Amino acid sequence: MAVVRTLLYLVVYPGLLFLFVYSTFCEWFDRKVYARLQNRMGPTHTGRFGLLQPIADFFKLMAKEDIVPEASDKRLFTVLPIIGLAVVSTAGLLLPVWNFDLANPGLTSFSGDIIVVLYLLSLPTLILFLAAWSSTNPFSTIGGARVLTMLFGYEVPLFLTILSPAILADSWRLAEIAAFYQAKPLLLLTNLLGFLVAVIAVQAKLERTPFDIPHAETEIVGGTFTEYSGKKLALFRLTFDIELVISSGLLATVFLGGFPGGAVVGFIHFVVKTLFVIFLLSLLRALTSRIRIDQVVSFAWKYLAPLAVLQLLVAILLKGLLS
Amino acid sequence: MSFQVPIGPQHPALKEPISLRMTVEGEVITDVDIRLGYNHRGLEKLAEEKNWIQNIYLVERICGICSHSHATCYVQGVEKLMELAPPRRGLYIRYLVSELERIHSHLLWLGVAGHEAGFDSFFMYTWRDREIVMDLLEMISGNRVHYAINTLGGVRRDLDEGQKAKILEGMVTLRKRSEYYFHIGANEPSFVGRIAGVGLLPKDKVVALCAVGPTARASGWARDVRKEDPYAVYGELDFEVATADTCDVLGRVVVRVKELLESYKLCEQMVRNLPAGDIAVKAPRKVKPGEVVSRYEAPRGENIHYIKANGTDKPERLKVRAPTLANYPATVEMLRKGFIADIPLIFAAIDPCICCAERAVTLVKAGSGEESVVRMSDLRRQAIARHQNAPVKRNAVWPL
Amino acid sequence: MTDAELIEKLKADLGDKVAEIANPARRRLFLKVAPSDIIAVTTRLHDAYGVVFLSTISGVDNGETFEIVYHFSTPETDFNLRTEIPRADPHLASITPVIPGAILYERELQDMFGMIVDGLPDPRPLVLPDDWPAENYPLRKDWKHTRPEEVIPGGKS
């Protein structure tokens, strides 16, 4: 029975199948919002309101010819998309929407899981870099170098801002942090600044405009993905979609009070809050133009990092006041 | 570490084939080489074999965006050779289409600049409004791309009162929207941060390298053929030459938006003061021997046609210089010491319109980086050989 | 300054370097100079008359000779400098030391007419493909385009 339950947990809910369906829905939502902000219709044809469009895109890519460049490191080139997908799906298991019960912690909810999620969310960046480097194309190589350069910009502010609510809640466990803020919702307001910084940093992590520099198509063609096609590209795109869900779920847990109310109500909270975060991300994407790589790094260190430190100081001072 | 990045002949940032070889060190460009000829169609040679009327439609096909510019430049030159005086109503309609074409071209360019900078929302909005002017052009001429409204001695279609009202109405909407874009383009921080100070071209370089059009005007060199050599109706109209002194891509955006506003003014003046009368006079079939230099301010800069006649119904020589060719030396200068991220912006900022051809393909081997030039027929032979030797793919046959 | 005054001034200034000055239309001047004087006249116009902008260079095949027309313009007047070089020995001096922007037009002349422009900083072909057969100059009057029959291996013959 336990084996079947674990399998269901990994494959159906909240494992691969659920993440696939929900992440494609989020992609649809993102595309629709982006399109409406640009005075377009967005997907309309496949399924009702075009809901099935991202799934159709995924299967179309799966059916396309898969080309591996001759000069590339073939083994690495092939295995990286799978590792990337595995890493973000693993991060998905740790969100406190399916292991909300504090009294009965499951295997995937433990003290320090916030660190594990952050670590698992950092790995795709390295995988992207390796993917770019192994394809040996000049465009990919430049893209890979840009991926790493950007990582040094946004990663530190993201960590600082996500950890400051944890410091205030005095816990390294996502479910406990959420429970702390559910008990004292007013304290969420003190983290507003951190939330904004985190949204921008997540936008950079997901490589969306204005931070879509590693695959800026008008500059370096496909950047990191120039040589990827067919199934491998489909897996990479799915990886990004799932990363979008996990990152917004993480922000919702830490900054928006988690998902209270058990399995059903909690799940509704999850949907509403992640969609809210994704809406903010889409808004940012529609309103800005791509900036240069040097501007990203200087922006991250001149504005984001000091604001994140300020948020950390606020959290520490508040904690002193409260205790 | 320095290596070569090939931008083109096929690249998402380029709408037409041209090859830019960038030698880069990290993100900084150290050297640039431009190669042309991927789109050369031998039009000047072809023009010597066609008669004066046929050539109008030939030169119109030099470019899809500034088609009317080439046709008008050619027609006004030939009319001088024929000593024809087209009726004023015909001239007003011809240059009304010119200004509408300038509006459509500049709106298109604004969208492209937004897209190259990754600002797709800007692109979507400007191209939506470009539809207004495209519809007006279709209403006037019946066509959206090659208007074919010019003929020797005038134009081929007349305007009625309803069309005049429609044009004025369109100008009001466009002016309102353009002012909003001007506000966005000059104030949205990520966009301005991206284009300010990029692609610097000081005025002395502009003069030395003979740049034309908005590229020259954005560096403070106020040269506009409409003003300094007022052809046809421009002497009677009231407009100003838009300039900027920032010498960068931001300046080129500002110049083009200002020119848009000037063009709306010009269109309104021409529609309101449209004289009555005929729209065309009959043109002779042959032309006396002679030569003429015809200049025209196209949306991208000065367009010049040198036409030489030998007394027959065909030209002896038709030399066309499109504005983009004059801007290439300046582009190389602008790209040097820039960032890779600035390539599409700088290159798009001259509003390139590439009309030149090649029948060879350059292949770069991924591993060794060695280059070889292959003829099309060899390439086809290789492709066929490869397919013959390759094993039949599993999914090559579709079982039903 | 009207065109007539300008012509008088040019005649006095350039002397016998200019063979004839024609003024077929308002604002259009056609100056005829010897090929050896082209740099001297261009430099003089550049320095003393503010002729800094070169619109283009046109080549014309006149049979025994090639005619080259340099189209300069200033905000007031268009100067068209005309010169002729023999077809048998088509050497022309480059004006890039005076006007660097002339380079593309001079390279085009080399491609299309087979003129040899001396002193070009970058004399590679401009618009013709790399495998273009030598001694084929498309804009010469005696050059006729014949489309080579493309043989497709394995195709219908």
Image (cartoon, coloured by chain):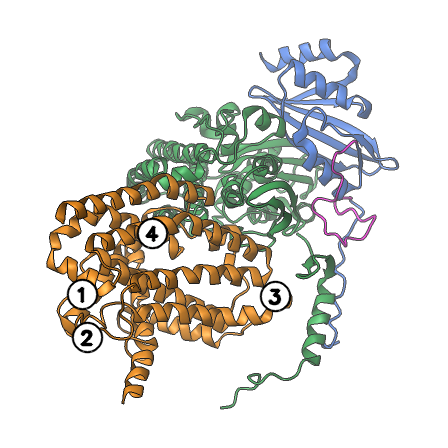
Q: Which is closer to the viewer, label 3 or label 2?
A: 2
Q: Is residue A47 magenta?
A: no
The residue that mark 2 highlights is: A104
Q: Are marks 3 and 2 on the same chain?
A: yes
- Do dots 4 and 2 share one subunit? yes
The orange chain is A
The chain whose colour is blue is: C
Mark before the other along the chain sequence, 4 or 2:
2
Answer whether residue C130 is magenta in the image.
Answer: yes
Residue A72 is tagged as: 3
Front residue of this view, candidates B311 and C103: C103
Mark 3 vs 1, N-terminal side: 3
In percent of width and height, residue B77 lies at 59, 34
Find residue A158 and name its label.
Answer: 4
At horizontal 85% and vertical 37% (from top left) the residue drawn is C87
Q: CA distance from mark 3 to mark 4?
A: 33 Å
Distance between the alpha carbons at the discs numbered 3 and 1:
45 Å
Which residue does the numbered mark 1 point to in the structure image? A259
The stretch in magenta equals C119-140
Colour applied to chain B: green
Mark positioned earlier in the residue sequence (3 or 2):
3
| Residue at 38% from the left image edge and 73% from the top image edge | A56
Give the quadrant of residue B184.
top left
Label 4 lies in what chain?
A
* Residue C13 position in % (x across, y down): 72, 10
